[in-house]
Image (tube, rainbow, N blue to C red):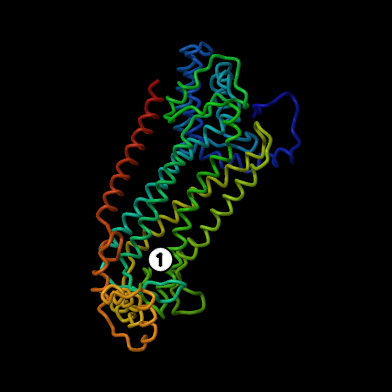
Amino acid sequence: MPKLWDKGYELDRFMEEFTVGEDYILDRDLIEFDIYGNIAHAYMLSKIGILTRSEFSRIKRCLLELLERARRGKFEIKREDEDVHTAVENYLTNELGETGKKIHTARSRNDQVLLDVRMYARERMLAVMGELLALAGTLTRFASEHREVPMPGRTHTQRAMPSSVGLWSGAFAESLMDDLRLLKAVYSLNNQCPLGSAASYGVPLPIDRQMVSDLLGFERVQNNVLYANNSRGKIEAMVVFALTQITEDLSKLANDLIFFSIPELGYFSLPKEYCPGSSIMPQKLNPCPLELTRARSAGNISRLLQLIVTTRNLPSGYNRDFQETKWPLMKSLEVTAECLVAMRMIFEKLKVNRETLMKSFTPELFAADRALRMAAEGKMPFREAYRKVAAELDRLEMEDPVENIRSKRHIGGPGNLGLENLAKAINAEKRALEAERRRLRSVYDGLRKL
């Protein structure tokens, strides 16, 4: 098949394979977005007189047929195609002849791939948001069900003060909601249309970039045509940074669960059906999903670093280095969604061992609370109360852990977790997410009807 850059000479076979890399494989996930981008671009070309209405109609019909073929697995991007843009354009040319060759007018593969990746990231970020909200909801329900189940709180990994299962799990639900706020901000930064920037310097034609942006459902046009190309890798890094915040939370949560479920503690029992065994030790139930979540969070960090260092100090304009930014983004989106699903499944079946947790309480866990009460009731400086309690640690009396939890009624304390407000916030975000999904579905339906 001819290359889009073909000028009458053959590229060395090794160099062709080296430069194409895995693009032809990765681009299979971009087919739908490339097709919709082509429809919007062709419609705009028809409005400025580059294509006739008849030519546009034939191109759109051919592209929608190709989309159905792709969904049935009947369209393949081959290595010799190099990328999805070439494969789609060659298909149009084979089907429509000279009309198909007109589709690339006023475009470069540079702004095409920017567009496809932005649309891909938009869809996949919405999927991640959905899984994040599902896990946050599960954690909030878990916290509510176990809000008064006492659990030793820890600092420096050592037993510190009375806590609860509700406080612990609710902390992660709130953290995920902060991650969502960050991801939504990055979603907005990603949601700007680069098409029309071409090779970084625009085109001498009266193209309507705003029309294309609106047709594709973007929040705005990415204005400066040079910045559009300079931002490749930068926007991807922002997305992956937001994803690392999610997976770092999941890593901490996984680490806690691994520790709290060891037999020596036994605070929780992991679902047996999620825990592979050992090939040599019959008794083993290994927390492999949690360990892999912990490990794969490190992968997101490494891909973030890859994105940052790949694009640092590049000269302005397009550079082939940008090709290496595609996989880190796509892999990080995939891994983050999978880790969220795995953690949600575990919490839906996680068993809380209340009796074990109650037995884990000993008098010294109440030392700080005792010192605080002495300071308040005896009108003495806290530091003096602290020393008095420290001197009589071996004589401290056991308190009721549940009553201790209930006594801490200030905002966010173990006795006032604010889970109802958290649940309302999660539901509101779910409604907003579904509204955005509906909006994008209407965008794609609208492209079909042009």
Please state which of residues 271 and 240 is positioned toward the viewer in this rendering: 240
Front residue of 68 and 6: 6
Which corner quadrant holds the C terminus?
Answer: top left
**Looking at the picture, how far across and down is residue 249, in whole percent?**
44, 58
Q: Quadrant of residue 230?
A: top right
**Relative image position of residue 15 (x, y in whole percent):** 74, 39
Quadrant of the rendering where the N terminus is positioned? top right
Q: Quadrant of residue 172?
A: bottom left
Residue farthest to the bottom, as pictured: 395
Q: What residue is drawn where x is 51% and y is 78%?
A: 280
Q: Position of residue 332 (x, y in %)?
A: 52, 49
Give the total number of marks visible in the rendering.
Answer: 1
At x 40%, y 73%, the residue is: 261
Which amino acid lies under the numbered mark 1 shown in the image of this protein? Tyr
**x%, y% of residue 308?**
61, 46
Q: Which residue is mark 1?
A: 274
Question: Left of 394 or right of it: where is 83?
Answer: right
Few, some or many residues within 10 Å of mark 1 (<14, 14–19, 20+): some
Image-quadrant location for residue 6: top right
Determine whether 420 is above or below 433 in the image: below
Classify mark 1: helix, strand or loop. helix
Q: Is residue 37 placed above or below 421 in the rendered structure?
A: above
Q: Nearer the viewer, residue 96 or 178?
A: 178
Q: Residue at x 45, y 73 (%)?
A: 157
